[in-house]
Every structure is written in C-alpha cells, then in structure tokens.
Image (cartoon, rainbow, N blue to C red):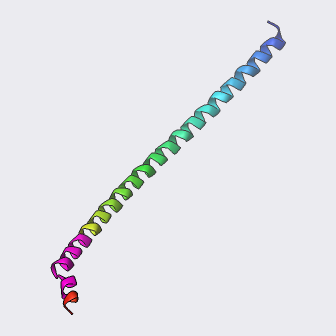
Amino acid sequence: MTDEGMELLQKRVQQVIGLIERLREENKNLKTQIATMEDEIQKLKEELNAIKQEREEIKSKIDVAVSMLDSLNIEDDQDKT
C-alpha cells in the first residue's frame, strides 16, 4: 500500500473513531433524557393517583350530603305548603 493509501486509511479510521465517540456521547445524553422522562412519568402517575383519590373522596362526601338532604324529605315538606 502506498503512503497516500495509508494516509487515506488512517484518515478514514480517525473519522470512524470520531463518529463512534459522538454516537457514544449522544447515547449517554439520550439515556439521561430517558431517565429524566421516566422520573417525570412516575411523578405524573403519582399526581394522577392523588387526584383520582381526591375526586373519589369528594364524590363520597357529596353522596353523603345528598343522602342527608334526602333524609330530610324536603320535597315532601314543600309539596304540603
């Protein structure tokens, strides 16, 4: 192989090494982003569960209040007047 051919080969090898280094760095960054997004997803799931639980508690309190109002027979009293 000529000196020119060797230089060209070395240049190509250096380019490949540079590409591999960039891809490794990009891979590292993407893994970090994935971990961050997974943490955010977990936080959002927890928040959603808290909101659902709060909604169920409110619904339960409303049901109790409606039952209490129903037990007063307000409609029957209004019909008599």
Q: Check the image and name the residue furthest to the left.
A: 71
Q: Check the image and name the residue furthest to the top.
A: 1
Report the predominant secondary structure element of the magenta stretch. helix
Camera-nearest residue between 39 and 56: 56
- The magenta segment is 61-77
Quadrant including the C terminus: bottom left
Q: Is residue 13 left or right of residue 40?
A: right
Camera-nearest residue between 19 and 77: 77
Relative image position of residue 41 (x, y in whole percent): 43, 50
Relative image position of residue 13 (x, y in whole percent): 70, 20
Which residue occupies 21% across, 79% down?
69
Q: In which image quadrant can residue 14 be found?
A: top right
| Vertical side of 32 occupied by 46: above or below | below
Q: Is residue 34 left or right of residue 49?
A: right
Relative image position of residue 35 (x, y in whole percent): 47, 44
Residue 66: in magenta span: yes
Which residue occupies 29% across, 69% down?
58
Q: Check the image and name the residue furthest to the front.
A: 80
| Vertical side of 19 occupied by 54: above or below | below
- Count of marks overlaid on the render: 0
Q: Is residue 80 left or right of residue 26?
A: left
Camera-nearest residue between 12 and 30: 30
Which residue occupies 38% across, 58% down?
47
Relative image position of residue 71 (x, y in whole percent): 15, 78
Residue 57: in magenta span: no
Quadrant including the N terminus: top right
Which residue occupies 20% across, 72% down?
64
